[in-house]
Image (spheres, coloured by chain):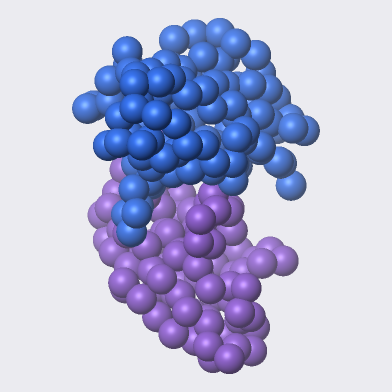
Chain colours: A purple, B blue
Amino acid sequence: DAKTTQPTSMDCAEGRAANLPCNHSTISGNEYVYWYRQIHSQGPQYIIHGLKNNETNEMASLIITEDRKSSTLILPHATLRDTAVYYCIVRVAGSGAGSYQLTFGKGTKLSVIP
Amino acid sequence: GAVVSQHPSWVICKSGTSVKIECRSLDFQATTMFWYRQFPKQSLMLMATSNEGSKATYEQGVEKDKFLINHASLTLSTLTVTSAHPEDSSFYICSARDGGSGGNEQFFGPGTRLTVL
């Protein structure tokens, strides 16, 4: 699976949009971009994923550049409860058991400030 | 969304004892389950992948005889840490894939914090 690069930490004011970048310059055509987050001492929580097109759900929006070498997770109105480590993961699509594995990097520690 | 539970949420044991951690998918059938370990201030590290009814596949460096994984049903996987030692103290997290939906998302349990004295 392609490696990802994320900033170590970011701050965001409560109520503002949080934009978390991720570089995945070696991504292959059959690899998805996934975002998970982990609040302190809890298991990771799935946020969103995409292949080529931008995606939006009730939690966030995912913007993928046209060349697919980078993406941005957007939390439109950050709250204190969004303080967490956010992981950007690239994973191959497929049906083999190994294709479902997730490789976690260090992620971005997002601190939402009152 | 799909819910995965773990039991216990935390456990303290003496060195040399064995500890069993359960991972359950509550509202879906998990054809594949994963076990991760997370040390303080570090990221999650995949330990093993298990498919229902077959032997688990362990990642390099993970001792299969020390970390016994059983995935006997589509809703339950167990991880047994045998002869636990203080260096096994960690946060153990399972995840499960909903094979019935055909999706690729993994749903994570809340984790089990193991402390070995």
Can you give x and y, in whole percent of width and height, for residue B35 in the image?
A: 45, 32
Q: Quadrant of the C terminus of chain B?
A: top left
Can you give x and y, in whole percent of width and height, for residue B49 in the image?
A: 43, 25
Could you tell whether B16 is left or right of A34 in the image? left
The answer to whether residue A67 is seen in the rendering is: no
Residue at (31% x, 73% y) in the render: A7
Could you tell whether A63 is left or right of A56 in the image? left
Can you give x and y, in whole percent of width and height, for residue A32 in the image?
A: 46, 49
Residue at the extreme right: B27
- Above or below, A49 against A103 in this view is below
* Residue A20, quarter of the rendered image: bottom left
Number of numbered tags placed on the structure image? 0
Residue at the extreme left: B61
- Front residue of B85 and A99: B85
- Front residue of A31 and B110: B110
- Above or below, B35 against A14 in this view is above
Residue at (48% x, 43% y) in the render: B113
Residue at (56% x, 8% y) in the render: B53
* Residue A4, quarter of the rendered image: bottom left
